[in-house]
Amino acid sequence: MQATGTSDNSIEVEGLQRKFKNGPLAVAGIDLRVKPGEIYGFLGPNGAGKSTTVHMLTTLLPPSGGSARVAGHDIVREGPAVRAVIGAALQEAALDPHLTAREHMRLQTALHGLPRGERARRGDALIERVGLSDAADRKVGGYSGGMRRRLDLALALVHSPRVLFLDEPTTGLDPQSRAALWDEVARLAREDGVTVFLTTQYLEEADHLAERVGIIDDGKIVAEGTPAELKAEIGRSSVEAEPVEPEQAGGVLRVLERFGEPVPGADGNVAVRLEGGPECLTDVIRALDGEDLRVANLQLHAPSLDDVFLEKTGRHLEGAGEEPGTDEHEPAEAPA
Amino acid sequence: MSAAAAALAGSPLPTQVGSLAGRSLMRTLRQPAMIVPSIVFPLFLLAVNSAGLDAATNIPGFPTDSYLTFALAFPFVQGALFATMNCGQSLAEDIENGFFNRLALTPMRGSALIAGQLGGLVAIGLLQATVYLTVGLLAGGEMASGVLGVPVLFALSIMVSIGFGGIGMFMAIRTGSGETVQGTFPLLFVLLFFSSISLPRDLIEQEWFRTVATINPVSYLIEGIRSLFVVGWDAEALGLAFGIATALIALSISVAAISLRNRLVRT
């Protein structure tokens, strides 16, 4: 599962652990490698250990065990050197509601030691880059969630970091703001060669943005690879049916079992992993029709990262069903 | 110097302090709810006390015939108590909303954060002191130490503000909670009322009250400030006030700095 460690990696993590007082291991010995310029998606439900990992890698939280290097610097022994080459936008947009975007930039550029003459230029350029020029002199307290996130991202870029940590950057954003942020993150990696370590609980986000994904659950990485590789591990599509009459669920399941082994479905639904691939969907419909079983909805699921999560942990990723378009559903007509 | 090298080195300490102090001042000035009460309430209490307790000047041995002049020290110390809350609360907000982590990810020194917060506090303290003094004198108060007493008065009241501000910072850093900081305000206020704020200590009739006021260091801060209005140049009162203010600063800033080191657990 893990790449071999090389000094060329932007992030190298070996057996990283964090235990909180009187609690279980929040991060239970993870290993991972992220290459320069790569967007690495760290996917997992709430409480899986994503933010704790980010806090350790950004030097804000000392690890309880293991080691990690960011841009070649040890996160414990070389904290200042790590901080000099990283940018971070943590879970909540860390902004002062009483300051304007330009004042935030002024403070951030000054603290990072940019020469006085460059501060305003750098701040204005970043504000423009994230599309906040028109709002640059307005107090941040009046910003929308998307504007706050964009400013947070811009502030993380003040000192031209080589590695960028984004902790659930699009949580709570509307689809338009989310898409705008994705574009900006993709551009950073593509055009500026910035390595991006992105935590998310959104399948679509990991699928859309990340070149490789690590899936974390209960502090352990349970799967890692490109989204395509991970889905290929699961291999087969599944079909999920919602019976019109709930008491017919048993009958519907018996028909579906002819086409594959059962897998968990949504409440009241029955689902099987298709042995014959998506092309046998028409046979499924005919079989249900032949048994006079009526279904209100029949969906073909191409393998998704949620299926990978389900396969590895036995449960769905929290919120997976809440995200519009997060599953690769292909609705099919229900039989009459 | 490359951006990364600049980021590693960070800016010089004075730049960091100046930037953080500017931010502290700006955010305070933009919250009238933090400024107005700290100016209005002390003046309101000054007006009520000087009107209601004027007869106290008839007590034999009372050091002045103007209770307003006697009570003018009160707003300076009460304003400093407000500084405790304002300074602590803004820092607690930074911790609560994650801004503190943003600062921690820069090459900011812990000492710059403390000095920056206090820098903003000093500016607000100067504004408060100017208003208290102007209103007090316009209302008929007297300044026995004359014009030369003004900078001494400002220096002492700023030192008292810094000392109490350090307590607010300590509470904020230790608890990370604005509510806790607010909760300490009434406790500190008790210190003000169990002091020689209303009467000179030797004229307090109740022995237990006199004892409490004598061991209460706030009494000496008040008496130092009051001496500039009532006596002129009282070396003993001023020496005690500056000494206690210095000790308060040393103690509160030390515990704030130790707490900051624990809170700022950067590797």
Image: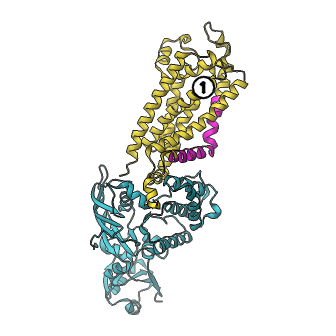
Chain colours: A cyan, B yellow
Where residue A81 appears, as percent x and y from the top left, is 38, 57
Considering depth in this image, is B248 or A204 the residue closer to the camera?
Answer: B248
Please give the name of the residue rendered at 45% of the width and 74% of the height, measured from the top-left corner.
Answer: A209
Q: Residue at x 39, y 39 (%)?
A: B258
**Which quadrant of the figure has residue A137?**
bottom right
Tell which of A87 and A286 is nearer to you.
A87
Q: How many marks?
A: 1
Residue B254 visible:
yes
What secondary structure prevails in the magenta region? helix
Which residue extends farthest top?
B60
Query: Where does the magenta region start and end?
Result: B15-42
- Depth order, front residue of A276/A192: A192
Above-or-below relation of B254 to A324: above
Question: Residue placed farthest to the front in the image?
Answer: B1
Q: Is residue A250 visible to the viewer in this orientation of the structure?
A: no
Residue at 49 percent across and 39 percent down: it is B181
Residue B232 on the magenta segment: no
Horizontal and vertical percent for residue A56? 35, 57
Check residue B37 for magenta coloring.
yes
In the rendered image of this protein, does residue A93 appear above or below residue B63? below
Q: Which residue bears the numbered disc 1?
A: B153
In the rendered image, residue A168, in percent from the top left (x then y), is placed at: 45, 64
Density class for disc 1 (Cα within 10 Å; few <14, some 14-19, many ≥20) is many
Image coords of residue A289 (percent x, y): 41, 91
| Vertical order, A48 against A275 (above or below) | above
Which amino acid type is shown beneath numbered disc 1?
Leu
Label 1 marks a residue whose chain is B
Q: Secondary structure at mark 1?
A: helix
The correct choice, above or below, for B10 with respect to A13 in the image is above
